[in-house]
Structure formats: C-alpha cells, structure tokens
Image (spheres, grey):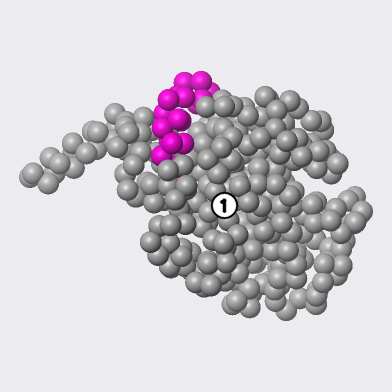
Amino acid sequence: MLYHIKNEIAALVVNVMKKVNIGGVPEHFNLAWYLTLKNGEYKAEGINLRWHDYHGGTGAMCQGLRTGDIDIAVILTEGIIKDIIAGNPSSIVQTFVETPLIWGIHVADKSSFKTIEDIKGTRAAISRYGSGSHLMAYINAKNNAWNLEKDLNFEVIKNLNGAVEGLTYGAADYFLWEKFTTKPLVDDGVFRRIGECPSPWPCFVIAVRNEFIENNEEDLKTILETINLTTSEFKSIPSIDKTISNRYDQELEDVQEWLSLTEWSQELIDEKTVTNVQEELLKLDIIPKKVAYSELIYKV
C-alpha cells in the first residue's frame, strides 16, 4: 500500500513539473544528456526533461522543431543554420561540441569502389534532404573539385539501418556518417571506409524553438547550466571510456581515440564561425542568402 502511495506521489510531482522535450541522435556525443537524466538532475530543478532519439538525424530534428514535437535539439551546426534560414522558427543558444565531426565515407564491403575518385558521379545515400549526410556530400564533392551539378546524385535512405540495406543491395553507392558510430559496421565487414571528411566547423549546437525561449527562458538557462557542468568535466568521469564502449558497442581503443579528438563547449557559437558556415553553404547553393548573426542565435 505504502509503495503504491509513493508511486502516486512521484507521478503527481512529475505531472506538475515543467515538461520539456529534447531530441538528439542516439550516439556517444550525447551520453552527457543520458547521465544527467539518469541522475535526476533536471527533476531536482522542477523540470521534466524528456529525451527523444532521432535516428533520422538533423533533417528529422529540424522537422521536430518546426512542428513543436521537440523544444530543444542537439543538432548539426550546418543543418540547423540552413533550416533557420529556410524558415525554422528556432535559434542557436550554444555550441555543444566544439570540435569538427569526422565523417567517414563508406561503401559496401563487397563494392568495387576503392577510392574517393571511384564514387564520383555515383549515388550518395542520405538520411533526407537537408540532413548532415546530404550537406556533407556537397562538402566532400567540393573538397575533391567535383562538378556539383553533374557529380552528385542522391538516394534517401532515412537512417543508418537504411544505409546498411541501401549499400548492401545496391540502391545507393556511398554514405557519409560519423566515423566512430559506423566503425562497428566497418569492423563487421558491412561497410568499408574509403576516406574521411571532417566538417569545417564545430559539429553540434543546441537549438531551441523561439516560442519556448520566449516563455521558458529561466528553465532553458537551468537546463544549459546543468548539462554544461557535466560536459565541462566529462572526460574526467571515472571509466567513462569503458562506459561508452559498453553502451555503444565500440572497441575501447576507438572510444579512447574519439575522446582524445573531441572537445565539448559551454559557450555560444561566435559570429565568425556562423559567417564561415554560411559562406560555405552559399558557395554550394545550399542556402539562397546569408542572414545576420542575430537572426540565427539567441544569447540566454
């Protein structure tokens, strides 16, 4: 009886808390969110933060912000900048991961493609138009002096599982995805990595719907302060490499390499970086124009 009463009280407490929906990819970059949620750190501040995995990546999260399915997204920098310019009523409030994302360029293990030049003009698997895998295919093409109109073709595969099926059965020819996330598929002989393409800017930012910012700025400030405390000391958490290895099914040495290459941020993305991203996207005809820094960011 007492157990049931305690459960009912706990449920009532959760119901009166401010519910906030946040989305992100279910990858090691976001482990800090899982840890703070598991520790009940947001509930201790009266916030019922609910995490939603977005296997479809940036494009799916942009849609989630637009529809209000999520209030906050931990999202690729280039993807959210493109979508805000395209009318997404959201703002970047902070850089989350300062270092570039290292995209692996993958083909099916049994594919005849051996080099980047071999995949020129073939079909890139992308999770959706406007996604990171879509935008980085352009960056890779530019890096290799391809003709952006003739040498890029796309096949929408929705997510990583779709890419496995698409490449294995020949619906698409190559796929860009974060190197360490796909490493187990390379180790298992599903994919073969023929190159890498680092993003030329910090990889993840935190974006928030403008309506949420207007009505809940103090809650947002609390959420950011909470996650920043964890990310600022993330690498010093005891056995964090083993935790990541076990949770994400990655080899320990791969996790240790990834940790050595990755730096989190607790600061707002600066104007110079935003300008650089927009200039690159404009050159690639991914955005129609550049907009003012103030139209893309909000300082909490």
**Does the rendering let one see residue 83?**
no
The amino acid at mark 1 is Glu
Image coords of residue 206 (percent x, y): 56, 39
Image coords of residue 180 (percent x, y): 60, 64
**Does the rendering let one see residue 280?**
yes
Q: Quadrant of residue 156?
A: bottom right
The front one of 1 and 98 is 98
In-image side of 293 versus 205 (left or right): right
The question of residue 224 being in magenta is answered with yes
In-image side of 110 versus 212 (left or right): right
The front one of 108 and 230 is 230
Q: Which residues are magenta?
A: 211-227
Image coords of residue 246 (percent x, y): 43, 68
- 37 over 123 or under it: above or below: above
The question of residue 110 being in magenta is answered with no
Q: Which secondary structure class fits the magenta region best?
A: helix
The front one of 247 and 224 is 224
Q: Quadrant of residue 60?
A: top right
The secondary structure type at the circle numbered 1 is loop
Q: How many marks?
A: 1
In-image side of 248 versus 142 (left or right): left
Give the residue drawn at x 60%, y 76%: 187
Give the residue drawn at x 67%, y 72%: 191
Q: Quadrant of the N terminus?
A: top left
In-image side of 44 versus 239 (left or right): left
Give the residue drawn at x 51%, y 57%: 28
Give the residue drawn at x 12%, y 46%: 3
Image coords of residue 122 (percent x, y): 84, 63
Q: Which residue is mark 1?
A: 263
